[in-house]
Amino acid sequence: MFDADQIKELKRQIGDQVEAGRVELDKLVAEAKSLAGSVKVIKPRSATSVALMASDGGNNKVAFNPFYLQVVRVVDSKGKELCLEVVSPLSDIEELGRRQFNADGSPRTALGKLMNGLGVTTLKELSPMMSGKSSSWVLVFRDLCEWATLYDLICHRDYATDTLIVRDGLLRSKIFAKDYFVQMGHLMHEAIMQTWERDRCRVWLVGLAKKTQVLEYYRLAISLSAVLDNGTPCFVKVPKQMLDVYQWDEYTRDVDDKGVGEDPKFNFGSMHFVRFGPYSGDPIWTVDIMSRQDKDAQAIFGYLQADAVAGFPIPFYPNCIQQADSFSRVADIDLDIIEDNLVDAIREQVGETKAPVVDALRLASDVAARRYE
């Protein structure tokens, strides 16, 4: 614990550091103020909102060393299960890829449809992170399944009314090989245009993130500049100079930007700061809309704002995402069922004579954890 003299010294040093950074803060505030002319008021609208998201990695992993299972579950905001896979770092990745197709080679799952659309036949070809060299490939597989479900929703579904499809996370990813991510975005945009021409129904794709590097860096400057404090829900497009906080140009450049440097391959979104509440204290979110749907930003944010007003338990956060999150979680009794099945499978493998050893390990208490009880 700090004593009085140490606290005094800490206060002095912290003050010196903040004073030294004042020039940078003033620069950021000036950049934030420059957004004022581009801020637009959101006019609420109503439409069908469909959200999808993968179960959070902290809620759907089950371990009984050396066995570790990742339950990949993608559910929409109405509770419909769109994808269910159980994988382990010990799984055969080649066999997992083959499982996405029927015996005749036709796609069996949403991931199979995505692989077929991109012209790839193996998971390693789709993502270099699916090599199996690191056990974290199971999390990459989870993300691939979520993107594939999103692709399936847009490219292989019919809609009877204008529909907003919302992803929990930005429309950016670095897990795909080559420019497959941008190709996927192009295929989805083509499907959206075909839906409009065939059924006269508009489909919009949105990605929304609770935290982003650019928003965290500019949050204080945006608050000090009061650029969004106009007493009404509003949004503003994030200018290119603010996106310099990201290291990779391919992650921030527009999909149609053919300027100097490597072509964009990790992004097909157009980033905006959005506040769905009317007051200065209401949360600000970072939202990606498809760059080729930028002209529909007012309509898109109007639909999102109407859904966000009912958001719970997170205020002014789209309710459809929160519903999908609630449905997709693998916890409580669902988690107990998976754990029981894992233990039963291990007991079968070790044989009847060694099964009591497995039971004893499961029932053993964590002695070291008692100090925290």
Image (spheres, rainbow, N blue to C red):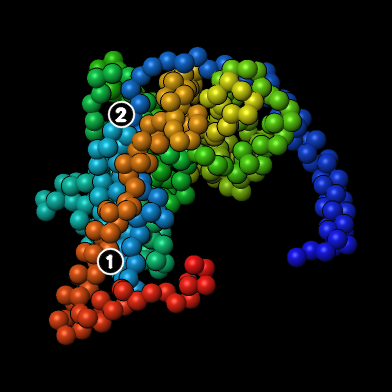
In the image, what residue occupies the spot 83% across and 58% down? Answer: 7
Q: Secondary structure at mark 1?
A: loop
In the image, what residue occupies the spot 32% across and 53% down? Answer: 332
Q: Earlier in the sequence, mark 1 or mark 2?
A: 1
Q: Amino acid at mark 1?
A: Ser
In the image, what residue occupies the spot 20% across and 84% down? Answer: 354
Q: Depth check: 308 or 303 in front? A: 308
Q: Amino acid at mark 2?
A: Ala
Q: Depth check: 247 or 160 in front? A: 160
The CA distance from mark 1 to mark 2 is 34 Å
Image quadrant occupied by the N terminus: bottom right
Horizontal and vertical percent position of residue 312: 44, 33
Q: Extreme front residue here?
A: 373
Q: Which mark is residue 91?
A: 1
Does the image show residue 166?
A: no
Question: Mark 1 against mark 2, which lies toward the viewer?
Answer: 1
Horizontal and vertical percent position of residue 147: 35, 43
Q: Report which residue position mark 2 lands on.
A: 191
**Decide: marks 1, 2 in contact (CB < 8 A)?**
no
Q: Depth check: 106 or 84 in front? A: 84
